[in-house]
């Protein structure tokens, strides 16, 4: 990014240099140019290719993020359904953990959001930090419409997570897709969680793992997991065991 006169900035796009639009509130509608002077609570300014996320208010961006979360969830369910239609539900189930393993490779991009001293996976030194990382993606635990539960800490490197609400599992249970529930909870979810916490020494162990039994009280938690920091890297991806729960 180079600087021009009076602090105006320039950016190189495909070899061409363009002057960045200033926040004047003036738009050239015939050319789709211009930026609003103040923050927008609604996308009610003229259409412009200069408008950026920074032009919107905090309230607008939160609303947009909530919609993105629902969009992402719909995309995941659509993906699972379409793969199932073409290749069978078993193939769709088997591919889910592969997708989460792949997404986990991109987790380091979230590191700077924890603070200026987080540069690599080695900077995630505790389970607490790993769980903060896992919360940051759009399908992370911050989305209370997707997940809701409680965390009990023994220390910074050992905790128990009790999940009282899981929209994905409730969706598949309602469809009667119990094989999918079993595969997601016993294989895909722990693999995805371990990919999201970044530190390879963090081990996720199922204590109570779906599918639920007919004898279970509907008010009982969906699942219970232990997160523990080990003294060496743990098996990841296809190398980790299937979680069937200790039911204790």
Image (tube, rainbow, N blue to C red):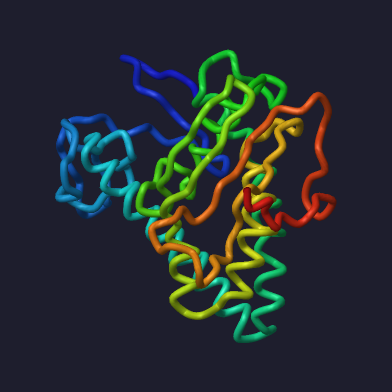
Residue 183 in sight from this viewpoint: yes
15 lies above or below 103: above
Q: Residue at x 58, y 31 (%)?
A: 159
Number of callouts: 0
Q: Residue 53 is drawn in which quadrant?
A: top left
Relative side of 131 to 27, left or right: right
Residue 166, how many percent across, how many down? 45, 57
Residue 103 in sight from this viewpoint: no
Q: Residue at x 36, y 47 (%)?
A: 144
Q: Residue 196 is drawn in which quadrant?
A: top right
Residue 60, how many percent across, how many down? 23, 43
Between 121 and 194, the residue placed more toward the observer is: 194
Q: Residue at x 70, y 78 (%)?
A: 90
Between 33 and 168, the residue placed more toward the observer is: 168
Relative side of 141 to 26, left or right: right
Residue 115, how many percent across, how many down? 51, 18
Q: Residue at x 61, y 59 (%)?
A: 185
Between 209 and 27, the residue placed more toward the observer is: 209
206 lies above or below 11: below
């Amino acid at each position: 990014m180079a600087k021009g006169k009076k602090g105006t900035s320039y950016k190189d796009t495909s070899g061409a240099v363009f002057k960045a639009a200033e926040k004047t509130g003036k738009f050239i509608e015939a050319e789709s140019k211009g930026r609003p002077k103040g923050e927008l609570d609604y996308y009610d300014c003229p259409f412009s290719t200069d408008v950026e996320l920074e032009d919107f208010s905090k309230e607008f961006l939160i609303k947009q993020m909530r919609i993105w979360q629902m969009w992402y969830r719909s995309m995941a369910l659509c993906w699972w359904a379409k793969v199932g239609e073409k290749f069978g539900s078993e193939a769709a189930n088997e591919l889910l953990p592969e997708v989460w393993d792949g997404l986990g490779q991109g987790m380091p991009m979230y590191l700077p959001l924890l603070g200026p001293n987080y540069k690599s996976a080695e900077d995630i030194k505790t389970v607490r930090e790993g769980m903060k990382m896992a919360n940051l993606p759009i399908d992370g635990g911050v989305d209370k419409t997707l997940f809701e539960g409680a965390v009990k800490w023994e220390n910074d490197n050992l905790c128990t997570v009790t999940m009282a609400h899981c929209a994905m599992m409730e969706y598949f249970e309602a469809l009667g897709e119990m094989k999918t529930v079993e595969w997601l909870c016993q294989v895909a979810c722990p693999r995805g969680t371990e990919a999201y916490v970044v530190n390879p020494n963090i081990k996720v162990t199922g204590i109570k793992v779906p599918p639920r039994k007919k004898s279970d009280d509907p008010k009982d938690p969906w699942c219970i997991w232990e997160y523990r920091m080990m003294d060496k890297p743990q098996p990841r991806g296809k190398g980790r065991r299937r979680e069937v729960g200790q039911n204790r």
